[in-house]
Amino acid sequence: MTAIPTRSTPAAPMPDTDTADVGATIALFRKCDRYTTAREYQAAGLYPYFRAIRECEDTVVTIDGESKVMMGSNNYLGLTHHPAVLDAAAAALRKYGSGCTGSRLLNGTLDLHAQLEAELAEFLGKPSCLVFSTGYQANLGLLSGLVGRGETVFLDKLNHASLVDGARLSFGDVVRYNHGDLDALERKLAQHERRKGALIVVDGVFSMEGDICDLPGLVQLAQRYGAALAVDDAHSIGVLGRNGAGTAEHFGLIAETDLIVGTFSKSLASIGGFIAGEESVLHYLKHHCRPLIFTAALPAANTAGVLAALKVLRGEPQRRAALWANTRRLQEGLRGLGYDIGPTETPIVPVLIGAIDDTFLFWRRLFDAGVFTNPVVPPAVAPTQCRLRASLMATHTAEQIDGALETFAAIGRELGVLS
Ligand SMILES: Cc1ncc(COP(=O)(O)O)c(C=O)c1O
C-alpha cells in the first residue's frame, strides 16, 4: 500500500462555524477544502499517484509519451500479456458476455467459477475453494464471515490493510502483535479463553518489506492454543513453493495451515480472490460472507484468464526460476551499491530512502530516467522509513535490471542517499 503523506498542512482560512452562515458551505466537505497536501506535491511536480498508462507491453509501459521499465507491478510471472491468457479471456468474453450482473449467490455463478474453484483447491492441496471478486473482498469476507462476537482475531501489525479492515468489520475482538514477534503473540494467545474461537491471520509474504512469515512458529502456536491459522498468500502464489503453491507449500505445512487466502491480481494476472480450506468452513462462508453475497461475481473473462494463467503457472516452472534469478540480480546489485533493502527475501524489494520529500524526489528522478517504482510513505511506514518499492517480474531482462541499477546508483549519489 502506498498513501498520500499525512503531515499537517496549513488549513485554508475557514469561517467560524458558530458565527458563519452555515448554509453557505456544507460542513462535511470543509475538510476536503482544507486537504492540500496532495495538491502541494502536484504543484511541486512530485506527485507520484494515478499516473495514466497509455500503453503496456509486459515490462515496458508508456506514460506521457515516454517509455518506462515497469518495476512497480505485482505481475510476478509476466502473464498479463501471455497469449493463452488473452485468448481464454477473449473467448469467455464472447461466450458469456461482459459481466455477471449479479451475486454468486443468485444469478452470478458460472461453470467457470466452479471449474476455477476445483482447480485451485487441487493446486493448493485443500478440499475446497471459494472465488471472490477481489482479494480485498476475500479477506473482508474471511474475517467478517468467520470471526463473530466473543471470538478473537490475532493480527501481525504489518498485515495488509484488507486484513485490518476485515477484522474491523467482524464482530470479534481484534488483537495485534508487533511484526513477527511470536513471543508477544504467544503471551496474547495465553490470555485468550481457549473454549472461544480464535483465528491467527498473517501475510505469507509481507507486502511492504518482502519478508516471509514464520509459518512453522505460527503453526506451533495455533496448535498449542487451539486457534485456526489463515495465511494471506497474495504475494506467494506463483512465487513460493516447489510448485508455486505459496507459503504453506514452501514450508511443507499445507495440512497444518487451515485456510489459504489469495488474489488473482498478482501472479495470476487478473483481478479476483479466493479462500481455500475445509469444505464445511467454505460452505459456512458461502452463506455468511457479505463481501461475497452483496456484490457481483467475477466476470467470465477474468475467470477464464485466471484458469489459463494457472495452467501456465503450473506448466512453465521456468518462469518462477527466471523470477528468482531476477530477484537475486536486483537485490545483490542494490546491496552491492550500498542501499538498505531491509529483510526482503522475495521479489518485493524496498529501497530505504528516509523522509517523505526525499523519497518523492528520488521517485521522480527515477521516473524521469525511465524506471517506474512505487513510493511507500506514512501511514504505511514510519515517517523516517519511507522507501521506494521495486518488484520483479519473470520477464524482466538482465539489461533492464542492470539499467535500473545504474540509474539507482547515479541518482543515489547525486541526492546523497549513497555516499
Ligand atoms: C497482502 C495482500 N492481500 C490482499 C490484497 C488485495 O488484493 P486485491 O488486489 O485482489 O484486492 C493485496 C493487494 O494489494 C495484498 O498485497
Image: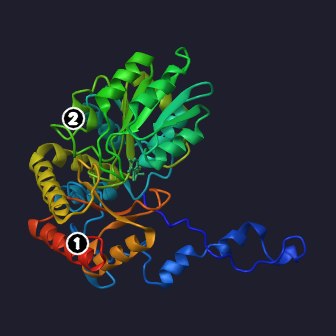
Q: Nearer the viewer, mark 2 or mark 1?
A: 1
> Which residue position holds label 1?
408
Which residue is at 20% across, 59% downward?
A: 393
Which residue is at 84% across, 71% downward?
A: 17
- 93 horizontally vs 338: left or right: right
The quarter of the image holding the N terminus is: bottom left
Using the image as rendered, state which of residue 4 and residue 307 is in the foreground: 4
When the figure is inspected, residue 143 is found, relative to residue 256, above or below; the finding is below
Asked whether the viewer can see residue 68, the reply is no
Q: Amino acid at mark 1?
A: Phe
Q: Which mark is residue 146?
A: none
- 241 horizontally vs 116: left or right: left
Q: Residues within 10 Å of mark 2 (few under 14, many from 20)?
A: some
Mark 2, ligand 1, within 8 Å: the answer is no
Where residue 272 appears, as percent x and y from the top left, is: 38, 49
Where residue 39 appears, as percent x and y from the top left, is: 54, 79
Mark 1, ligand 1, within 8 Å: the answer is no
Asked whether the viewer can see residue 182, the reply is yes
* Mark 2–mark 1 distance (CA, rounded to whole Å): 32 Å
Q: Amino acid at mark 2?
A: His
- 405 horizontally vs 269: left or right: left
Using the image as rendered, state which of residue 349 and residue 228 is in the foreground: 349
Where residue 286 appears, as percent x and y from the top left, is: 48, 32
Indicate how the structure is coloured in the image.
Answer: rainbow
Q: Which mark is residue 250?
A: 2
Q: Secondary structure at mark 1?
A: helix
Query: Quick one: label 2 or label 1, which is nearer the N terminus?
Result: 2
**Which residue is at the far top?**
195
